[in-house]
Image (cartoon, coloured by chain):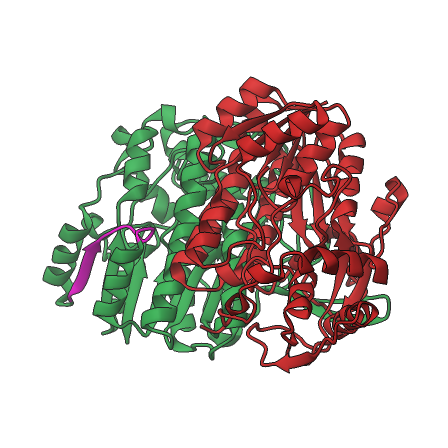
Chain colours: A green, B red
Amino acid sequence: MRILILGGDGYLGWPTAMSFAAQGHDVCVVDNYLRRNIARETSSEALFDNPNLVDRAALFEATHGKRIRVEIADCNDYRSLERIVRDTGPEAVVHYAEQPSAPYSMRGFDEARRTLDNNLGATFNTVWALLQHAPECHLIKLGTMGEYGTPNIDIEEGWLDVEHNGRRQKFLYPRQAGSLYHTTKVLDTDLLWFYVRTHGLRVTDLMQGPVYGIDTAETRGDQRLMPNFHYDDIFGTVVNRFLVQAVAGIPLTVYGKGGQTRGYLNLKDTLQCVALAAAHPVKRGELRILNQFTEQFTVNQLAARVQAAGARIGIDVAVKNIENPRKEAEDHYYNAKHQALLDLGLEPHLMTEEVLVEMMQHVIRHKAAIDPRKVLPRVRWNG
Amino acid sequence: MRILILGGDGYLGWPTAMSFAAQGHDVCVVDNYLRRNIARETSSEALFDNPNLVDRAALFEATHGKRIRVEIADCNDYRSLERIVRDTGPEAVVHYAEQPSAPYSMRGFDEARRTLDNNLGATFNTVWALLQHAPECHLIKLGTMGEYGTPNIDIEEGWLDVEHNGRRQKFLYPRQAGSLYHTTKVLDTDLLWFYVRTHGLRVTDLMQGPVYGIDTAETRGDQRLMPNFHYDDIFGTVVNRFLVQAVAGIPLTVYGKGGQTRGYLNLKDTLQCVALAAAHPVKRGELRILNQFTEQFTVNQLAARVQAAGARIGIDVAVKNIENPRKEAEDHYYNAKHQALLDLGLEPHLMTEEVLVEMMQHVIRHKAAIDPRKVLPRVRWNG
C-alpha cells in the first residue's frame, strides 16, 4: 500500500513510518520540524538527540533494508502538500501533522494562533489535496480523547444517539475540550465530518489517549531509531514525565487532586491501531471514529504505578500534589468506550510493572542529561 | 455605551451602526471591504451602489447629527484589531466580520480557504483582543441557525440536555452545517465556548436565520444610507433574490423540492435583537446562545408569498423548481425554538404582504439595473 505520513518526524509519526515500511508498504513521510523548532524555542528538548528525518531514514534503510521517502515540507502550504500527494498517489494518509502540545497552545496569543493556524490549515489542506488528487484515498486522522472532555455521561465512540421530545437523532458525540490544542482537534473533526458528508471523503478519526513508550519492534533498542522522548511540561506526556522525575529523584508532580482519569495506551498499540485502521478502510462518505486507548487510570493511580516500578529497582519515588496549572475537573465521572479497535483485532500491551521498569531503565542510561527545569509546569491555563 | 462593530460595512453591520449611533451610543465601525471585493471578483455586485464607509458615515452625520468612527482595517490582522480595541475601549463588540456567503465558500479551494482563514482568524483575534485589552467587554457574535443544520429532533436554543444510560449532561446543541461557511460558524462557536470556559469571556452568540429587508428607521428612504442589497446567488439571501426575480420577470428559482424550512427575520428585527443583547449583557464566563428569527417557512411557502405580493401590484410571478445546487434535505422535520429574544422584549416585524410589496416597489425603482446573469446558481456543492 502507498502510505503518506504527515508529521512523520513526530513521537508517533516516525515509529509509524518504520512500522509500515517494515511490513513492506511504500512509505513517504512529510514534516517541517515544527515540533523540534518549538522544543528549542521553549527550552523543551527531548531527553536524547534524534537524527533528522533524512538521517533516520538512511539509518533505517541500512538496518532494515527498506526505503522511506522523506519530504521536508509544511502541510499548511497547499502547493507543497498538493505536489507530494500528486507525486505519491497515496492509498492511505496518516495525518499527525499538528502542533501537539496543550500547554504550548495555552501559553499566549502567538502560540495559540500558531496552533490554530497550523492544525486547522494542515487538516484543511489535507482534505483538499485528497479531494483534488486522490479522492479514493483513506484519510486516517489523529484526533484525541481530549476532544470529549470529561462529560458526566458515558463517552461513546464518536457518536451519540439522542432521544428528545419523542424523536431521535444520531449526532457527532458533543465535544468540549480542555485546551486550545484539544479544541483544534474538535474543529478538525467538525471540518472532516463536513467534507465527508458533502464530498464523500473517506475518513477514520482516531480519538487517542495519552501514549507512553520508547521502544517498538523497529527500534531494536537502537536509540538512533527511537522516537523523540519528551519529559518536559510542554511536550512530555504524563507517563514519560513521571518516569523521568522518578529517575531524577524529583517528586512526581500530580496536578491538583490527581483524580483526573484518562485512557492510556502503549506506543506499540498506537502502531497496531493505525495499521488496523489502514487495513480496514472505510467507504466513501464514511467517517469512522475509533476511541484509541487500552486502559484508564487516574493520575494518582499512575503515580502509584510508577512508584511501585521504582521500588522494584531500588528507586524511592516521592509523589507531590502541586497546584494545577490547568483548568480541568480533578474528580469526575469517566467511562469511555473503546471496543471498536478490539473488534478490529487490537491486542493490547498493558502498562505492567515490567513495561514501566524497562522504560525507567532506559531513562536511567540518560540520567545525566535530565534537566530538572523542564519538568515543572511553566504554563498556566488562566495566563 | 462604547460599541465596536466589526464588519460595519455589511448588510447588517451598517444598519446596526446607524441604529446604535441614533440611540446615542458611541459607535466605531471596522471593515476591510472583503465582501465588496468578493462581490466584484465574482460579478455579484449589489442592486444599487452604496457609498464607501467613510462617505456613509459623513452622510449619516450630516443627516442625523451623530458621528460614527470608521476604521478601515482587517480583523484578521491582530495588530490592527488590538490597536482599535485599545483605542476605543469598547463595552460591547458586535462581531459580523465574516465572509458571509455559503456558495462562495463552496466554490473551490481558494474560496474555501479564504473563508476558513478569515472567519476563524477574525473570531480568534477578537477573542484575544478582548482578553488582553477589554476583558469586561461583552462580545455579541453573529452565528447562524445554519449551524444546527436540519436534525430530526427539535432545535433548542444553543444547548441540549442529554440523558444517557441513566446519567445526565448538558451539552452545546450538536451542530452539523450544510456549507463550509456555516461550518466556520460552528468552529467559531466551539472556539468561543472554549475561551468562555477557560478565560471567563462574556459572549452572546446569535443563531440568526436568513434576513430580508432594505429599510430601517435610520435610512428614512434615503438610498445612500441603505444597506447593500444583494440579489445574486452568492450574497443574496433568498427573500431578496425572489423579490428581484419577481420584478425582473424571472421565475423564482426554488432549489429542488422547496421543502427546505428555515427561520426568517426582518432586518429591523436583527437591529432589535442586537440592541436587546447589548442592553442585557451576560456575566463573565457565560455563553448565552439566542436563536434569532421570528417565523419559519419552507422555500415553497416563501415563493407563494412573493407570488401573492406580486399579484397585489399587478406582477405575474412564476415559480420554477430547479435542480438543487446545494447538498441539503429538501423535505425534513424542522422545529426550532426561539423564545429567549421574545422574553428579552423583541417585538417582531412579520413578513406581511405589505412588507413584501414595499420591498418590491423599491426593487421596481431599480428594475433597469437588474442583471439576470446573477440570479441563477453558479456554484454547485459537489464541485
Please indicate whether residue A342 sits to the left or right of residue A375 in the image. right
Please indicate whether residue A153 sits to the left or right of residue A158 in the image. right
Residue drawn at point x = 52 percent, y = 46 percent: B119
Q: Quadrant of the N terminus of chain A?
A: bottom left
Please indicate whether residue A281 sits to the left or right of residue B54 in the image. left
Vertical placement of A32 versus B331: above or below?
above
Vertical placement of A256 versus B256: above or below?
above
**In-front residue for pair A285/A144:** A285
**In-front residue for pair B198/A340:** B198
Image spot of residue B157 (x, y percent): 78, 52
Residue drawn at point x = 41 percent, y = 64 percent: B108
**In-front residue for pair A301/A44:** A44
Residue A289 makes an appearance in the image: yes
Residue B3 makes an appearance in the image: no
Stretch of the chain drawn in magenta: A67-77
Which residue is situated farthest in the left direction here?
A62
Residue drawn at point x = 56 percent, y = 52 percent: B100
Which of the 4 quarters of the picture holds residue B347?
Answer: top right
Q: For residue A352: magenta?
A: no
Task: Please count the marks in the image.
Answer: 0
Q: For residue A72: magenta?
A: yes
Please indicate whether residue B49 sits to the left or right of residue A46 in the image. right
Image spot of residue A103 (x, y percent): 47, 35
Image spot of residue B76 (x, y percent): 46, 38
Which of the 4 quarters of the picture holds residue B55?
Answer: top right
Image spot of residue B336 (x, y percent): 80, 60
Vertical placement of A321 versus B197: above or below?
above
**In-front residue for pair A66/B310:** B310
